[in-house]
Amino acid sequence: MQQSAVPELAHTHTRPIHWLATATALAGVVALSSALQPGSATAAQAAGPAGRPAAVAAPPDPAGVDFPLQCGPLPILVQNKATGDLDGDGRPETVASVRCDAGSGTPPNGVYVLTRAADAGQPRIVATLVDPKDRLTVTDLTVSGGAVTATLLGYSSLDVPRCCPDVDELAKWQWKNGAFLRSTPAGAQSV
């Protein structure tokens, strides 16, 4: 029998205890690295129009918002979104048109205005422009010049099939005196 020039070494064979030790060490490194973070930035922010602070936060993302829709087991679908500074505070808001993701049919939309706290916290709903209870479908959602515009498709009676809205209206919302006021833009006509 031939003997090997190098004896068999115990540490060259992996055992469960080796993997456990490695996982524990890795978990410790991850925990330690999350505790050691750099300090907050202290640079001054540039002033925006009329001496207000410049916008520092990105527009609120509707993906993490809990919308007040009753969809049962169906997911909520953000169909359209638009962003802009609606209240003149220098920070952008997001307007989101959402509905239940039914896969077929024409579920009604809800249109919500989202904002984020000055400390860049979670986005939150601050206004409902279209309530799903109104049974409207929303298209052409835009934000421009501090105003929200959208086309609202609805039904003239309960006899109209839900697939085929027969009312078409252009709506506009602007922030005035602490609330969003709805109007019909000049030149808009209903069908």
Image: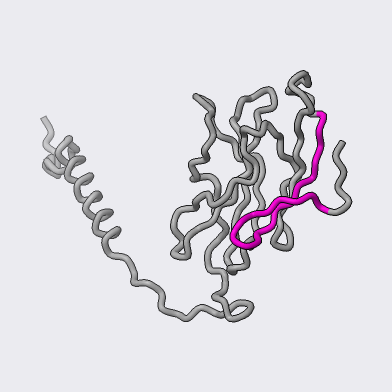
Quadrant assignment, res 78: top right
Does residue 138 sit above or below 30 in this rendering? Answer: above
- Nearest the eye: 38 or 74: 74
- Nearest the eye: 158 or 27: 158
Does residue 40 sit above or below 61 in this rendering? Answer: below
The quadrant of the rendering that contains the C terminus is top right
Does residue 110 sit above or below 171 in this rendering? Answer: above
Coloring applied to the structure: one colour
Left or right: 65 as drawn, with respect to 22: right
Q: Is residue 171 magenta?
A: yes
Magenta segment range? 166-185
Residue at screen point 67% across, 23% down: 104
Label tally: 0
Residue 63 in the image: x percent, y percent?
A: 53, 45
Residue 134 in the image: x percent, y percent?
A: 66, 34
Magenta segment's dominant SS is strand
The quadrant of the rendering that contains the N terminus is top left
Residue at screen point 58% across, 81% down: 51
Residue at screen point 17% across, 35% down: 16
Left or right: 121 as drawn, with respect to 160: left
Residue at screen point 77% across, 42% down: 151
Q: Is residue 73 magenta?
A: no
- Nearest the eye: 162 or 6: 162
Residue 126 in the image: x percent, y percent?
A: 54, 52
Does residue 103 sit above or below 18 in this rendering? Answer: above
Left or right: 77 as drawn, with respect to 181: left
Quadrant assignment, res 177: bottom right
- Nearest the eye: 181 or 171: 181
